[in-house]
Image (cartoon, rainbow, N blue to C red):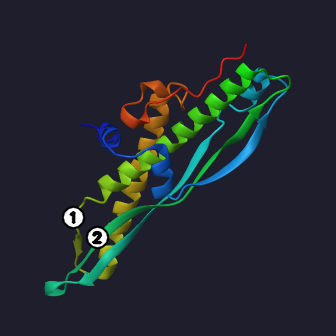
């Protein structure tokens, strides 16, 4: 099973609504008006109307000198400073009620897609945190092994984020995602 497929399965069975993900990951939002001269101008001006920025970090926990002069510790991965940037409103002149409804649906779809990035990051973090403690001959070697594991974990996080965006075409095909990642596509049909 590929790493991405494993993360998708973990997400598919992970509990929680989008709002619960926001709460447990302490997501902050950065919003702005998305305005254009027409529906088509709004969409052309924002091919990526949302973005999730996640600081994916690691640290050594429980680092200590063990028996026989060896050093041990566990690498713990964490998500910090999670910020989702998305439109707080989408508008253009002379919008009809149907236009407002479609724009609101697009905002909700963008929100869901960006929360999906947080779900992917949580699944990667949780999988990486299941590893055993490290053992090294000295504290410098322990740090070197931990740094290598941290870089591998960060690389996996970036790969799985790219895979999520590729699978959903950056949300435009969100309906194709499995489990809780599935949702409305981040597209709007202009009339």
Q: Which residue is painted at 40% across and 36% down in the image?
A: 180
Residue 181 in the image: above or below residue 52: above
The N terminus lies in quadrant: top left
Residue 136 in the image: above or below residue 110: below
Q: Residue furthest top?
A: 191
Residues 31 and 172: in front is: 31
- Residue 40, by quadrant, is top right
Q: Is residue 51 left or right of residue 61?
A: right
Q: Residues within 10 Å of mark 1 (few under 14, many from 20)?
A: few
Q: Position of residue 173 (x, y in %)?
A: 50, 24
- Residue 160, by quadrant, is top left
Q: Which residue is painted at 42% across and 62% down in the image?
A: 78
Disc 2 from disc 1: Cα separation = 7 Å
Q: Please tell me whether mark 2 sits on a helix, a strand or a loop.
A: strand
Provide the residue designation for mark 1.
132
Residues 141 and 49: in front is: 49
Q: Residues within 10 Å of mark 2 (few under 14, many from 20)?
A: many
Provide the residue designation for mark 2.
74
Residue 156 in the image: above or below residue 96: below
Residues 90 and 6: in front is: 90
The C terminus lies in quadrant: top right
Q: Please tell me whether mark 1 sits on a helix, a strand or a loop.
A: loop
Q: Position of residue 18 (x, y in %)?
A: 48, 44
Q: Which residue is painted at 44% across and 29% down in the image?
A: 167
Q: Position of residue 8 (x, y in %)?
A: 34, 38
Q: Is residue 96 left or right of residue 187?
A: right
Question: Would you say the residues marked 2 and 1 are in contact, meaning their CB atoms lie under 8 Å apart?
Answer: yes
Residues 73 and 46: in front is: 46
Q: Which residue is painted at 31% across and 81% down in the image?
A: 139
The tally of labels here is: 2
**Circle nearer the N terminus (2, 1):** 2
């Amino acid at each position: 099973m590929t790493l991405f497929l494993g993360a998708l399965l973990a997400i598919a069975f992970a509990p929680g609504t989008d709002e619960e993900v926001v709460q447990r990951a302490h997501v902050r939002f950065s919003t702005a008006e998305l305005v254009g001269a027409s529906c088509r101008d709004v969409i052309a001006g924002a091919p990526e109307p949302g973005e999730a920025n996640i600081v994916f970090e690691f640290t050594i926990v429980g680092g200590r000198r063990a028996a026989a002069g060896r050093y041990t510790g566990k690498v713990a991965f964490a998500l910090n400073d999670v910020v989702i940037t998305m439109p707080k409103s989408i508008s253009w002149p002379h919008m009809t009620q149907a236009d407002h409804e479609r724009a609101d649906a697009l905002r909700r779809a963008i929100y869901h897609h960006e929360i999906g990035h947080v779900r992917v990051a949580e699944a990667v973090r949780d999988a990486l945190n299941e590893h055993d403690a490290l053992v090294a001959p000295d504290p410098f070697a322990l740090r070197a092994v931990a740094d290598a594991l941290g870089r591998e974990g960060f690389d996996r996080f970036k790969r799985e984020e790219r895979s999520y965006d590729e699978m959903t075409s950056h949300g435009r095909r969100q309906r194709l995602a499995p489990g809780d990642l599935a949702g409305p596509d981040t597209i709007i049909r202009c009339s």
